[in-house]
């Protein structure tokens, strides 16, 4: 028999429960207040590709599910323009208030950006906690951050977001660690309601982040001395980047059918077919309407993207809004100073295993038609391995663009020289000649070329750096 606790006792137990249990016990309404099509066409800066309301609402529900909220209802409403006081019209606010009361909703997630005034007014009208899209994403980041850098960046972004919303008390920041500030009552550490203290804490975090950034810079310099090319995976959240990362590196990075399953960057060394080592970097997924302030806060995390030799733009081509998602990713890349048509970008069409035969044929034809205009997208399935050999070959071709090719003949007894070549170059071909001599065709990085020529003076150059990307 289920015991029904008095409200006060239930709240005390919820406060002590793990965050996941608190979330599961929070009846949540996800509300999508979307502009009508006519209003969207008039909206400044609107992209050509407009998402369907259903897809946007599904994404908002997915964001709520990423922190295990109990989503009991998800509805979308059309508006002509946001109201300054409550975002929604008066009649709609009253209608939703009745729904919230009837279904005992404790939290409303608004899939939009709310001003502090709008958030406060809606909370008063509905008698429930209200968070907007930015607040929800911050909560997810707070749950997922595991490295020191990630945790600091989350806290800084969270403090900046809350600074303008401290009008009554520190209801959002009652715990020092990120995540679920909106769910509990008084937490483990009560902080005095003082904006100056927030700013002081933000300043300290900024100093700590500078130190972390310097450390990451030293790590990059040490990698540059090796050196290995860096291949960074970018893409919309839940496009399958981590699954692809695992498939290419044989690693076990967390890969789930969940938005923002990866937050902290992960890097692994892996070998290409001809023996060249590259560093593959898995990064946080992008998402539509990601606040510029949040991009700035995570800029240090995305430094590997900025400095990568090759970018794999991973797209979920089975998703109905794949084109709109691609435009969002390209928009974030532009904010990082990377143009979408940059030669170092390889577009990877992932989740081929979810396509029907007609759609698969259409995409393969599109890819083939693209070859004359530049690097063609590659259709893959990170889950089944389909297309991965072609992808690694393309990566290898991109890496080879700045490298020279040489023909070398070694006597059969010179094992040390043969070992050096396998350790420091890509062995493209190996043939045994009369008398046991070994004829090799090798490709080598520019920074290693002087040492190679010094050791193998009789080597013959048979190919130089390519002037155009491999397609």
Image: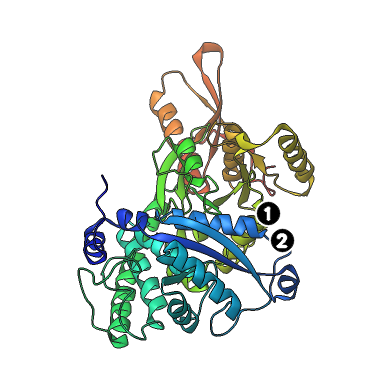
- Could you classify mark 2 by the number of other residues whose Cα lies within 10 Å: few (under 14), some (14-19), or many (20 or more)? few
Q: Earlier in the sequence, mark 2 or mark 1?
A: 2
Name the quadrant of the N terminus: top left
Say which of 280 and 352 sits in front: 352
Q: Is residue 467 left or right of residue 219?
A: right
The residue that appears at 56% across and 12% down in the rendered structure is 434
Question: Which disc is residue 49 wearing?
Answer: 2
Above or below, 120 against 345 in this view is: below
Figure check: 32 above or below 407: below
- Left or right, residue 181 beside residue 9: right
From the viewer's side, name the closer residue of 465 and 4: 4
Residue at 60% across / 82% down in the picture? 83
Q: Position of residue 162 (x, y in %)?
A: 38, 78
180 with respect to 324 (left or right): left
> CA gap, disc 2 to disc 1?
7 Å
Residue 444, position as x, y percentages in the image:
52, 40
> Which is more toward the observer, 2 or 64?
2
Q: Are marks 2 and 1 in contact (CB under 8 Å)?
A: yes
- Quarter placement of the C terminus: top right
Q: Which of the numbered marks, if any, corresponds to residue 323?
A: 1
> In the figure, 228 relative to 153: above or below?
above
């Amino acid at each position: 028999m289920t015991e029904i606790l008095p409200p006060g006792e239930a709240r005390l137990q919820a406060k002590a429960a793990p965050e996941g249990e608190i979330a599961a016990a929070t009846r949540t309404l996800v509300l999508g207040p979307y502009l009508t099509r006519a209003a969207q066409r008039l909206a400044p800066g609107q992209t050509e590709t407009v998402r369907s309301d259903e897809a946007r609402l599904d994404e908002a529900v997915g964001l709520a599910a990423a922190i295990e909220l109990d989503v009991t209802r998800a509805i979308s409403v059309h508006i002509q323009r946001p109201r300054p006081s409550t975002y929604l019209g008066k009649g709609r606010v009253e209608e939703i208030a009745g729904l919230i009361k009837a279904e005992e909703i404790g939290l409303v997630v608004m899939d939009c950006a709310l001003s502090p005034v709008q958030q406060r007014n809606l909370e008063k009208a509905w008698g429930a906690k209200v968070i907007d899209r930015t607040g929800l994403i911050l909560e997810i980041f707070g749950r997922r951050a595991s490295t020191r850098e990630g945790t600091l960046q989350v806290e800084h972004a969270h403090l900046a977001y809350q600074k303008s919303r401290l009008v009554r008390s520190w209801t959002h920041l009652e715990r020092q660690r990120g995540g679920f500030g909106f769910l509990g009552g008084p937490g483990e550490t009560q902080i005095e309601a003082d904006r100056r203290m927030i700013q002081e804490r933000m300043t300290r975090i900024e100093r700590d982040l500078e130190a972390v950034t310097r450390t990451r810079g030293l790590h990059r310099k040490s990698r540059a001395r090796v050196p290995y090319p860096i291949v960074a995976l970018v893409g919309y959240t839940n496009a399958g980047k981590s699954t692809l990362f695992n498939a290419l590196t044989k690693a076990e990075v967390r890969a789930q059918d969940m938005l923002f399953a990866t937050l902290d960057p992960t890097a692994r060394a892996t070998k290409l077919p001809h023996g060249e080592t590259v560093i593959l970097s898995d990064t946080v997924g992008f998402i539509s309407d990601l606040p510029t302030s949040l991009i700035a806060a995570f800029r240090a995390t995305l430094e590997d993207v900025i400095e990568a030799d090759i970018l794999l733009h991973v797209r979920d081509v089975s998703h109905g809004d794949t084109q709109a998602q691609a435009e969002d990713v390209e928009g974030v890349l532009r904010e990082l100073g990377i143009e979408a048509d940059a030669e170092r970008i390889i577009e990877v069409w992932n989740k081929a295993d979810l396509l029907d035969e007609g759609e698969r044929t259409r995409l393969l034809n599109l890819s083939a038609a693209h070859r004359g205009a530049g690097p063609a997208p590659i259709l893959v399935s990170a889950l089944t391995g389909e297309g991965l050999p072609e992808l690694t070959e393309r990566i290898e071709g991109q890496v080879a663009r700045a490298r020279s090719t040489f023909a070398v003949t070694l006597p059969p007894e010179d094992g040390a020289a043969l070992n050096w070549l396998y350790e420091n170059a890509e062995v493209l071909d190996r043939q045994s000649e009369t008398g046991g001599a070994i004829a090799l065709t090798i490709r080598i990085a520019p920074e290693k070329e002087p040492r190679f020529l010094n050791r193998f003076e009789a080597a013959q150059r048979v190919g130089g750096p390519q002037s155009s990307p491999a397609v």
